[in-house]
Image (tube, rainbow, N blue to C red):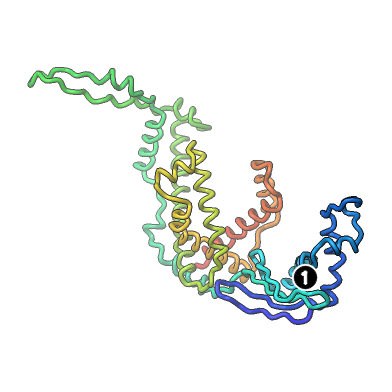
Amino acid sequence: MTKITIKKLPKSEVEIEGEIEADVFEAYFEKALKKLGENVEIDGFRKGKVPENVLLAKIPESHILEEMAEMALSEYYPKIIEDEKIDAISRPEIGITKLARKNPLGFKIKTTVIPEMELPDYKGIAKKTIGDVTEKEKDTTVTEEEVENTIMDIRKSRAPKIHMADAATSTSSQPSPETGEGENTKIPEPELPEFNNEFVKALGPFENVADFKTKLKDNIKLEKENQLKEKTRLKIVEKIIDETKVDLPDILIEVELDKILYRMESDITAMGLKFEDYLKHLNKTIDDLRKEFKNDAEKKAKLALILNQISKVEKISADREQVAKEVAMIMEHYKDADPERAELHAENVLTNEKVFQFLENQK
């Protein structure tokens, strides 16, 4: 390798320009010829056993040079990336600038890299956001009215359903004593099941009504606490996102858009609908949805970079034992999952959770 120059481009892209020395490049000639010869069929010779001089007469030199260039750069590109400490996150776009026998191989490679970012005072932002939470917002006390309303919702959900046919027969047209005209009686409300020990025992492992109410109250309180935590986390990250300066690469936005649309399609399919029919109903195309969700995708991409950068700065990492447990659970539920991807996913989720906990402790 002679000279390498690296030029920064917009949108977190870099252009790598350089040459591979003539003697190094020439060394790929025989390998390239042999590889191309494996697919050449010539009468009188077995496939892959054609002599070199016959192949040279049959295969154009330009094809051999192209194969040499591909072989050389597939070997040298990873070395360049490692030596120049380039954090590439996209497939390289390779252009050849000089291609001739017994000459250096000239090339230009464009690739997207992890963007440089300027983080704001994330500790200060977290501390102020937590400090701004009012006492009223912090109050997660559960009232008796909330417990009774939840019980009523559960009773209603367990009430026998009234079918339309039954409703029709129960709705009669009776003459009014005052007017003599027919008037429709209202469809009767379903009779609610009695709230007693038998009812709560049928719902789950509850000893009696008192036990059920105690556990229900605890669950409502826990739900309120989780809602407060999520609301506070959202405020913290939105403020950090707003104050973070980063030149976001298009590829990261596209990846997040792919995830959003994949989840949407999965949810629609799980409801027994076809995604194409759903789009027709909305009178929208995939491109329309990508435009609509672009801002959300940008936020998600930015947040992923921010959490990753904070974890590096603060030296926060997932517990290896927890990662192993999470991977085991993933592999148990998704038999065809790739173990390496499952591990990366688990590590990412658990590390992010620790970053959030770190921010929440800035009091």
Quarter of the image where one finds residue 171: top left
Amino acid type, label 1: Tyr
Question: In this orientation, which residue lies closer to the viewer: 304 or 194?
Answer: 304
Side of 260 where 337 appears, left or right = right
Could you tell me which quadrant the N terminus lies in? bottom right
- How far from the left and from the top, in percent, is residue 87? 66, 70
Side of 37 where 159 appears, left or right = left
Residue pictured at 44% horizontal, 32% vertical: 209
- How far from the left and from the top, in percent, is residue 18? 72, 78
User: Which residue position is annotated with label 1?
Assistant: 76
- How far from the left and from the top, in percent, is residue 304? 56, 62
Side of 331 where 294 appears, left or right = left
Question: In this orientation, which residue lies closer to the viewer: 115 or 77?
Answer: 77
Determine whether 161 is above or below 148 in the image.
above
- How far from the left and from the top, in percent, is residue 159? 38, 27
Determine whether 49 is above or below 161 in the image.
below
Secondary element at image label 1: helix
Determine whether 76 is above or below 267 in the image.
below
